[in-house]
């Protein structure tokens, strides 16, 4: 039997390349949020996969942002750099057939002193398989990657190869966490992520990214959890969108988020959500910190 190895792994890449999908595929539980819209992963989320010979502790980084320069994006980029200085292996994800300035700006953040595995995701979308090899050659010319692994996170293709590659670089012997730990994030944090995911899923096209969720109270009574949450938007107009006609949208957000939470927490959830307006919140570093962004 092989020895158990363990270590920290970060997943980085431009928005929308499939980092959350990959994490969910590897860890096998819904602990990170996946959204069609870019820029929804603003918190570090840790998932843990334990198998026969390894324990992978994933640190999902905030989406890298180059487009706007405000406090939120500065905080996000700082998060990426901090995370990369904190892990044993970095998985840098690009999309098969797409590699441009936005990916290269992430390459510039890659650490020189630790292994970086290039993950070429969405191979299922490739129309011309012959284009893959030249593409891999182009991308790998820009950095000294420890390995290159094409995968499809959505279809679960070659993700085992990726784990085998990552395992080679795990430094510790034995487990770092108890076997069934899926995440070191609190239920409180996960509750806010679920609500935020629903907001993006249901209203993503109508709302700008400036939406946050605050959990104001989280009470546990036996198997029942009472959760009181606020969706924070930065304009009155956005408040009206979140609430929707006759409160329809907010009702749906609450009902779907509650169902997810009941599944995850394995118990009944009483969920109350309201909408608050905080003007300009995404350009105020102090407020960001109070909402849990770094
Ligand atoms: N066809 C295909 N689509 C994928 C694959 N992996 C992810 N996607 C899709 O790509 C989109 C973005 O995926 P996410 O996992 O949210 O991407 P992300 O990199 O975490 O995005 P941010 O949170 O914005 O940084 C979603 O619509 C996924 O369903 C894949 O292997 N194949």
Image (cartoon, rainbow, N blue to C red):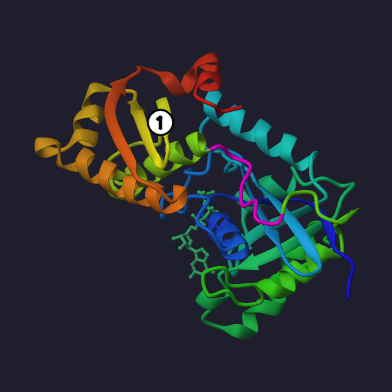
Q: Which of 233 and 269 is in front in this view?
A: 269
Residues drawn in magenta = 179-186
Picture coordinates of residue 233, whole percent (x, y): 33, 26
Which residue corresponds to the image point at 37% horizontal and 32% vertical from the top-left? 227
Q: Which of 150 and 193 is in front in this view?
A: 193
Which residue corresponds to the image point at 34% horizontal and 28% vertical from the top-left? 228
Dominant SS type (magenta): loop
How many residues crowd mark 1 within 10 Å: few (<14), some (14–19), many (20+)? Answer: many
- Specify the quadrant that holds the C terminus: top right
Picture coordinates of residue 253, whole percent (x, y): 28, 43
Q: Is residue 254 left or right of residue 133?
A: left
Q: In this view, does 133 lie to the left or right of 63?
A: right
Which residue corresponds to the image point at 72% horizontal and 57% vertical from the top-left? 91
Marker count (numbered)? 1
Identify the residue under disc 1: 213
- Give SS at disc 1: strand
Which residue corresponds to the image point at 21% horizontal and 27% vertical from the top-left? 237
**Residue 93 appears in view:** yes
Residue 224 sits in which quadrant? top left
- Specify the quadrant that holds the N terminus: bottom right
Picture coordinates of residue 58, whole percent (x, y): 68, 51
Residue 236 sits in which quadrant? top left
Q: Is residue 34 left or right of residue 273?
A: right
Residue 123 covered by magenta stretch: no
């Amino acid at each position: 039997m092989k020895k158990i190895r363990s270590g920290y792994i970060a997943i980085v890449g431009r928005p929308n390349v499939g980092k959350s999908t990959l994490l969910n595929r590897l860890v096998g539980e819904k602990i990170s949020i996946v959204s069609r819209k870019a820029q929804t992963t603003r918190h570090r989320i840790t998932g843990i996969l334990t198998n026969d010979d390894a324990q992978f502790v994933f640190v999902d980084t905030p989406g890298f942002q180059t487009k706007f320069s405000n406090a939120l994006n500065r905080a996000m980029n700082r998060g990426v750099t901090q995370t990369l200085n904190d892990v044993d292996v970095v998985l840098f994800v690009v999309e098969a057939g797409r590699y441009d300035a936005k990916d290269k700006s992430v390459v510039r953040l890659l650490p020189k002193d630790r292994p970086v595995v290039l993950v070429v995701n969405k191979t299922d979308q490739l129309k011309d398989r012959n284009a893959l090899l030249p593409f891999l050659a182009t991308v790998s010319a820009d950095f000294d990657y420890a390995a290159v692994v094409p995968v499809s996170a959505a279809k679960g293709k070659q993700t085992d190869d990726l784990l085998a590659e990552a395992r080679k670089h795990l430094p510790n012997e034995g487990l770092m966490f108890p076997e069934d730990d899926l995440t070191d994030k609190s239920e409180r944090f996960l509750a806010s992520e679920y609500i935020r995911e629903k907001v993006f899923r249901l209203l993503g096209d109508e709302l700008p990214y400036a939406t946050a969720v605050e959990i104001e109270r989280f009470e546990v009574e036996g198997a029942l959890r009472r959760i009181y949450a606020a969706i924070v938007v930065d304009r009155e107009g956005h408040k009206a969108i979140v609430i929707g006609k006759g409160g329809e949208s907010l009702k749906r957000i609450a009902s779907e988020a509650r169902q997810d939470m009941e599944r995850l927490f394995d118990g009944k959830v009483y969920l109350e959500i309201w909408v608050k307006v905080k003007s300009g919140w995404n350009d105020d570093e102090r407020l960001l910190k109070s909402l849990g962004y770094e």
